[in-house]
């Protein structure tokens, strides 16, 4: 089974992908992870991508699609794939169809995690972690039991990601709406799109995804 998880940054795609890997023995194909691995391994496509990134330019659709192609080629034919963060554009969606066909696969489901923008901003901007052990917290949803003290290791230093701010989050939402959301009608015409409330709890979202896949 091959599925795409769609949704803006912070919708929970990475968390749900990790759960699917454990529950369904699938492989998560995250473009960011694959790109970093290819650069580190100095593969031909990794070296090409590194040269582009070192110039400060964006990696092209062709390079991203080559990464997808290479990773699918290395997978067991019976193992399902979860596409996380890909495709992002109509061009990539078209390339993905060609890659899957090349390897005797097809796209089974496109699952969009729907979110409320204001609630998502609050969710992301409230995130922070222990600087010592990495334990995750949230200002309102999951604060430490004792203010200023990590529940896990007792550390007193915390950190926030510099891009976890309202301006950046809303900008990413805008990019998602303008670039990625328009690929949905093509998949809808094929009858493979399902939508889930991404603002529900992690377990509820996981259960809803499992119901779609079974």
Image (tube, rainbow, N blue to C red):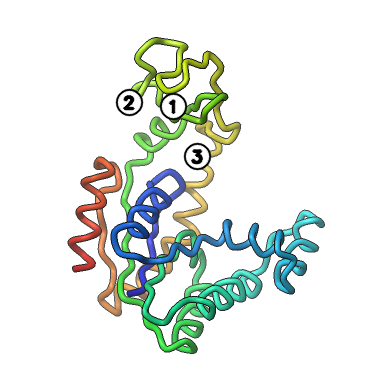
**Which labelled disc corresponds to residue 141?**
2
Q: Residue at x 35, y 71 (%)?
A: 185
**Which labelled disc corresponds to residue 70?**
none
Is the Cβ of the residue at disc 2 closer than 8 Å to that at disc 1?
A: yes
Q: Residue at x 35, y 21 (%)?
A: 140
Q: Is residue 9 above or below residue 87?
A: above
Viewed as shown, does residue 55 lie left or right of 176? right
Image spot of residue 131 (x, y percent): 56, 24
Point out the tag, 2 or 1, that comes first from the N-terminus: 1
**Which labelled disc corresponds to residue 126?**
1
Q: Secondary structure at mark 3?
A: helix
Image spot of residue 7 (x, y percent): 39, 54
Image spot of residue 62 (x, y percent): 64, 75
Pointer 3: what residue? 169
Q: Residue at x 41, y 10 (%)?
A: 147
Graded by Cα atoms within 10 Å as few (under 14), some (14 to 19) or many (20 or more), the crowding at tag 1 reads some
Image spot of residue 157 (x, y percent): 56, 17
């Amino acid at each position: 089974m091959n599925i795409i998880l769609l949704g803006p940054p912070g919708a929970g795609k990475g968390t749900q992908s990790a759960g699917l890997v454990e529950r369904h023995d699938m492989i998560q194909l995250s473009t960011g992870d694959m790109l970093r691995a290819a650069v580190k391994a100095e593969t031909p496509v990794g070296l090409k991508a590194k040269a582009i990134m070192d110039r400060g330019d964006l990696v092209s659709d062709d390079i991203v699609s080559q990464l997808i192609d290479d990773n699918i080629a290395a997978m067991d034919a019976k193992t399902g794939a979860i596409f996380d963060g890909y495709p992002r554009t109509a061009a990539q969606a078209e390339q993905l169809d060609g890659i899957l066909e090349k390897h005797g696969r097809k796209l089974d489901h496109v699952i969009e995690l729907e979110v409320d923008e204001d609630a998502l901003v609050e969710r992301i901007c409230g995130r922070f972690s222990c600087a010592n052990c990495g334990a995750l917290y949230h200002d309102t949803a999951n604060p430490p039991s004792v203010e200023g003290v990590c529940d896990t290791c007792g550390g007193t230093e915390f950190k926030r990601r510099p891009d976890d701010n309202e301006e950046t989050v809303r900008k990413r939402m805008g990019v998602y709406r303008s670039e990625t959301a328009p690929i949905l009608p093509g998949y809808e015409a094929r009858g493979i799109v399902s939508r889930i409330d991404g603002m529900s709890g992690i377990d509820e979202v996981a259960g809803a995804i499992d119901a779609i896949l079974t």
